[in-house]
Amino acid sequence: MVLVVIDYKTRKVEIAGIIPQAHGDWMKQIARNLTDPVDGFLKDKKYLIHDRDPLFTEAFKEILKAGGITCKKTSVASPNMSPFVERFIRSIKYECLNKMLIFGEKHLRYCVSEYISHYHEERPHQGIGNTIIAPQPQGDGEIVCHERLGGLLKSYRRAA
């Protein structure tokens, strides 16, 4: 299981956790991590929109509430109520994971990490004006190809 959170305004994605089988105690720790006052992903946020998965327990919601986060549950069978995260899941599956043979949790973590870096630093996003979330500095040199995951993910930019 890969738990993903996304900031709707910036489209920045964070992998909250990866575990073979999620359980309540793990979800409580994830809630504590997300609401950490120093570097939690939900720092300065007001809402968390989540689906109806039973992993989002009352204990999970109470930890978020203590951190100042209001939980909003989506309607039954309504993926259109969280379109950005649904689109991210579709993108990571289509562009990366469905094209790989994953050889364990460590390999999955590596593949997801590389895709997240590509998603933030190299991939333009149509919903935010075809801009890149965290672009790398551009030089004035010739155009060079940057590859990730053995050439599965490619991007082009000017060399320094």
Image (cartoon, rainbow, N blue to C red):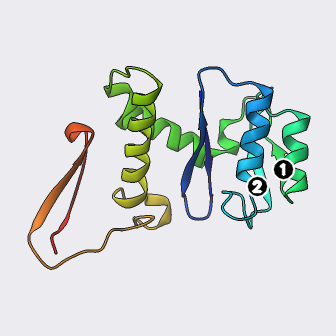
Query: Looking at the picture, does residue 73 appear above or below residue 1?
Result: below
Q: Secondary structure at mark 1?
A: helix
- Residue type, label 2: Thr
Q: Residue at x 90, y 54 (%)?
A: 66
Residue 159 image offset from top left, x and y in percent: 15, 70
Q: Secondary structure at mark 2?
A: loop
Q: Quadrant of the C terminus?
A: bottom left
Tell me: 5 left or right of 155: right
- Residue type, label 1: Leu
Residue 19 image offset from top left, x and y in percent: 60, 27
Q: Residue at x 73, y 32 (%)?
A: 26
Query: Looking at the picture, does residue 29 appear above or below residue 35?
Result: above
Tell me: 135 left or right of 40: left
Mark 1 and mark 2 residues within 8 Å of each other at the beta carbon? yes
**Quarter assignment of residue 61:** top right
Q: Between 138 and 11, which is closer to the camera in this rendering?
A: 138
The image shows a total of numbered marks equal to 2
Crowding around mark 1 (Cα neighbors within 10 Å: few <14, some 14 to 19, many 20+) is many
**Residue farthest toward the left in the current orientation of the protein:** 142
Crowding around mark 2 (Cα neighbors within 10 Å: few <14, some 14 to 19, many 20+) is many
Tell me: 11 left or right of 38: left
Q: Residue at x 43, y 59 (%)?
A: 126
Q: Residue at x 36, y 56 (%)?
A: 123
Tell me: 68 left or right of 107: right
Q: Which residue is mark 2?
A: 35
Residue 28 image offset from top left, x and y in percent: 79, 38
Q: Which residue is mark 1?
A: 64
Q: Quadrant of the N terminus?
A: top right
Residue 25 image offset from top left, x and y in percent: 79, 30
Q: Between 54 and 31, which is closer to the camera in this rendering?
A: 31
